[in-house]
Amino acid sequence: MTMRPGKLYGLGTGPGDPELLTLKAVRALGEAQIVAHFAKQGSAGNAQKIVAAHVRPDQALLPLLYPVTVEIEKDHQDYRSAIAGFFDEAAARVATELEAGRTVAVLSEGDPFFYGSYMHLHVRLAHRFETEVVPGVTAMSGCWSAAGVPLMQGDDVTTVLPGTLPEAELVRRLSDTDAAVIMKVGRNLPKIRRALKSVGRLPTAVYVERGTMEGGLAVSLADKADDHAPYFSFVLVPGWKGRPQASAANEVAA
Amino acid sequence: MTMRPGKLYGLGTGPGDPELLTLKAVRALGEAQIVAHFAKQGSAGNAQKIVAAHVRPDQALLPLLYPVTVEIEKDHQDYRSAIAGFFDEAAARVATELEAGRTVAVLSEGDPFFYGSYMHLHVRLAHRFETEVVPGVTAMSGCWSAAGVPLMQGDDVTTVLPGTLPEAELVRRLSDTDAAVIMKVGRNLPKIRRALKSVGRLPTAVYVERGTMEGGLAVSLADKADDHAPYFSFVLVPGWKGRPQASAANEVAA
């Protein structure tokens, strides 16, 4: 007898606030026998916390634990090998569940296809199993909404930049875009600040951390006195030059 | 007696599939006495269709009807004046409801702050009334998820480009980014196609229309025989050069 394989869901959980789950994510989660999630050793992971209220006791959690942390020496060959091997192994574990006929929801913070770890499983599994990607609200949407800062409008060009880029590259790209979203801030904040200053965009830049979560913070980057920032914070650089100016003073709501 | 003003919600409805509403959007919608939405003359508007199942008979609809269509002569002074006047008037109508103590949900397709019309009301009203922006799943997330095409990963730079840009500008920017999302395709499609071809990225580009809706379509742009495209279609240009190649043949699921 051949078992009918289970279905794979790449399930976007949104940026952190459990209310920002979509109706579809809740429904797909309810269909899953296995709820898989990426996490670091010793941490439950944010995605699991976001969906906790919707997970039933009869559903099994499948933690996929990163072998190494994400902010160290990404260009090193050992790191690349370890990570590729990890994703191969994680995909194999998920495949085993799917082959046994179980539906697996792989949680992905934000939107699964917007820089999400789920993508590494998708490219290894989607050609072998019935697969559906449930899009989610991105972390950047959560951040600019919570901060109340409009960034892009009309025919603006928007650039999403990793804060890991070299300073000269940040300068070049920030001077050649209307709006910008800088991700992976963390210890790159002093460099990001210098790049924004050199292109004259520091005064309008907004720093956001934990946008839609408890203890979330949004401040003008120019007013942020220290250079401490978690890895998953954002710097938002507004475009929309032609916007009405009436409410400019009201923009940043901490 | 002074009336306590109502609350303003900028309410993201997501990209089209009603299941992609967030729990928060449904809750906020339930709190509103007035459901406002932008629409063209003679059309109910997509946003209203997306939330239709959640609107009660006791809630009043407030259609905000564009005086002109959006794809004609945007740089013309008459157009700009007409549009600015329209947003002033729409904001005044919403303000009247808020001042009368009624909570108003302004529907916004996708994410309100990602190129949404709601932003024009936000900058006119958020400094005067209690305001909350409920982020939504963007149309681009809906499109790349429905198409099953991973675009950006790791330290990729992503550029969001309006298809209205001059061809030389599209060429320049497409040759200087990892991933790209081209919006406002419509009659700009032949130009977009030429720009992608000249930078060698036509073979991987994907054309998507009505991503998460009935009759949605995702095809390799190179395989699309005609140049017909609705205004709100997308062209997706994948980055993620280092991705595993196993499932490349499986990527575009029409």
Image (spheres, coloured by chain):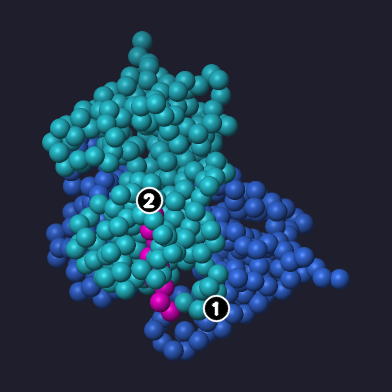
Chain colours: A cyan, B blue
Q: Amino acid at mark 2?
A: His
Depth check: A35 or B35 in front?
A35
In the image, taking residue A246 as reference, residue A194 lies left or right, namely left
Q: Chain of mark 1?
A: A
Vertical placement of residue A18 versus B233, above or below: above
Residue A228 x, y percent position in the rendering? 37, 51
Q: Is residue A230 magenta?
A: no
Q: Quadrant of residue A105?
A: top left
Q: Quick one: label 2 or label 1, which is nearer the N terminus?
A: 2
Q: Chain of mark 2?
A: A
Residue B214 x, y percent position in the rendering? 47, 50
Q: Is residue A240 magenta?
A: yes
Assign the N terminus of chain B to one quadrant of the image: bottom right
Residue A29 x, y percent position in the rendering? 50, 32
Which residue is identified by label 2? A228
Q: Amino acid at mark 1?
A: Ala
Residue at image position (35%, 46%) is A231
Residue at image position (38%, 50%) is A229
Secondary structure at numbered mark 2: loop
Residue A129 x, y percent position in the rendering? 33, 29
Secondary structure at numbered mark 1: loop
Residue A91: numbered disc? none
Residue at image position (47%, 60%) is A219
Q: Quadrant of residue A155?
A: bottom left
Which residue is identified by label 1? A246
Q: Residue furthest right?
A: B1
Q: Residue furthest top?
A: A1
Residue at image position (43%, 45%) is A110
Q: Quadrant of residue B247?
A: top left
Q: Which residues are magenta?
A: A234-242
Give the class, few, some or many, for how many residues have Cα within 10 Å of label 1's Cα (few <14, many ≥20): few
